[in-house]
Amino acid sequence: MNISEQQIWDLTNQAIDKLGANASPDMIRDYVEKEIANRHGGSLPTEKFEGRVIITAFGINKPGIVAKITGSLAEMEIDLQDISQKIMQNFFTLIMIVDITSSPRNLKEVQEELARVGKELTIKIYAQHEDIFQYMFRI
Amino acid sequence: MNFEFSEILETIMMSEVEHFDIRTVTMGINLRDCSDRNINVVTQKIYEKILRLAGNHVKNAESIEAAYGIRIANKRVAVTPVSFIGDSFSSEEYVKIAEALDRAAHEIGIDYIGGYSALVQKGMSPGEKNFILSIPQALATTKKVCSSVNIGSTKAGINIDAVKMMAQVIKDTAYITRDAGSIGCAKLVVFCNAVEDNPFIAGAFHGITEGDATLNVGVSGPGVVLEALKNHKDASIQELAEVIKKTAFKITRAGELIGRKVAEKDGVEFGIVDISLAPTPAEGDSIADILKEIGLEDVGAPGTTACLAMLNDSVKKGGLMASSSVGGLSGAFIPVSEDQGMISAAEKGHLTIEKLEAMTAVCSVGLDMVAIPGDTPVNTIAGIIADEAAIGLINEKTTACRLIPAYGMGVGEAVDYGGLLGKAPIMGVKVLSADVFFGRGGKIPAPVRSLTN
């Protein structure tokens, strides 16, 4: 979220006009949050994480794991770009590369949703930004 | 797929099984603009500046942790050495600054705040003397404040008068915090050749040549190195060095990425990555275990110093390639209480202070978290500090002492702090007198090494 100095100045002046001498820090905070929310169409702007995310899932193999995960990704309007899966002695490993730029959800929400799905399936699901792998394994 | 299956799994194994984490993201904050002749104005300015710059530091770091799936164990702040801001203050007034730092640290939710520090390697102003005398009280009345004093440097020599004072301060701090296992001493470091961009506590401070605010990062990862070595049972020493190098490279790259991202979010400049391998008391996250894996029966065996030298050098070589700005202490740490393998070696009597001292000649950072009997005489503590400083002085490296003369305790007992500070078994000290030496007073002149121009 970027607010220019001019906007901060305007907001401060507005707050002084509206709240007067009785303003407490809490009142000012409420006022400013409301004003910023108004300017961003009703809710405080949440931070957007752009780029590709690597999703890794592990657990005991059972039917429907891929369906369940991809289903929830589709619901979140996440673009699935690559998928690779292996079964090692009944142990299921899945790696997906997805792009969350077009999704209305941010990375944190995606992680929470996947954690919920993981719990349902009793498997572990990680979602990490691609850069960490890029940094560690590519020069 | 851009990445190999094995690469992705390796990263997840590192953070989930091998205890890999970023030890700390430390924001350095300049407090030189907070000076005033009125102590209440100073404390208010300090409090406000820390809140303004680092108010969201913890939140920002947590969001980066989540995004990349790498834990950041500690979020910290380091400030300009406090003695610079308040050279006209009394000891009581300095304590008020410590309390303001502690309040700010609690308010923003960080783990520690460093920089209750002074640099007195060449001499001491009356204000710095007041400052040093305030340390025991400051550490007793605060929880998160860490203190360090630099008493020597290759360019200036060793200020023996300051060494003596610090030995007394350590004793006093142990006494005044005796009800909590002399924990004040765990937050107090005496340095030779202190560095200005060290992100590690207790010695972190924001150097006076630094800008207004920087973000420095310290990595951890002995567990990862250990696992890598376990896969190379029959390797030659050069091959081991190569394995360590490659592992250190990956760890440092992760540190660099996380550091840059946190700096970006905090809105401050990125400073350095400190490529020290910092252990934790968790099982397997131990420098001692690495040394044993290289081929020692236990730490303290003849050969220990050689193995440590190889480990430390390999870590540096890997780290240097991985980061565009390496700094801080950058070497393997051997804190006794924070490393399960070191604790056990000390308890068995395999590791003595003398062997530790030799080890510190080839790694960072010194006699770190070493508990000694509570009745150790002041001049004996001064002797230990001076010896350690001499190693730093002559080898142009940072050395430090974080000694805990645990009040009322003796060899065979241990102080247990829990958390990252761990458990320190009391180690025996040779009580031979150096009273005449310290009675002489003065300083050890700068060595020939300092004349490099």
Image (cartoon, rainbow, N blue to C red):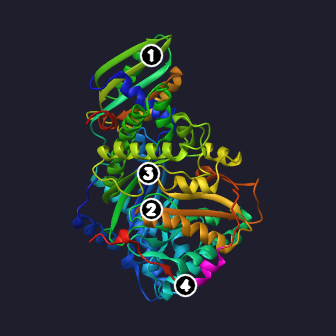
Task: Report helix, strand or loop for mark 4.
Answer: helix
Total marks placed: 4
Mark pair 3, 4: CA separation? 33 Å
Residue B306 magenta: no
Kindly identify which numbered label has been placed on residue B130.
Answer: 4
Mark 3 vs mark 4: give the one in front.
3
Q: Describe the element under mark 2 as helix, strand or loop.
A: loop
Residue bearing mark 1 = A65
Placement of B61 over or under B168, stated as above or below: above
Earlier along the polypeptide chain: callout 2 or callout 4?
4
Residue A70 shows in the view: yes
Q: Are marks 1 and 3 on the same chain?
A: no
In primary-sequence order, the first of circles 3 and 4 is 4
Rendered view: B216 above or below B441: above
Question: At 60% across and 62% down in the image, what residue appears?
Answer: B186
| In contact (CB < 8 Å): disc 3 and disc 4 | no
Q: Looking at the picture, which amino acid does disc 3 mark?
A: Gly
Q: Which residue is mark 3?
A: B331
As rendered, which of A132 and B192 lies closer to the eye? B192
The span shown in magenta is B434-440
Identify the residue position indicated by label 2 in the image. B398
**Mark 2 and mark 4, same subunit?**
yes
Q: Chain of mark 2?
A: B
Q: CA distance from mark 2 to mark 3?
A: 10 Å
Mark toward the viewer: 1 or 2: 2
Q: Secondary structure at mark 3?
A: loop
The one of B37 and B224 positioned closer to us in this rendering: B224
**Where residue B88 appears, x then y in whole percent?**
47, 88
**Residue at the spot 38% in from the left edge and 46% down from the top edge:** B255
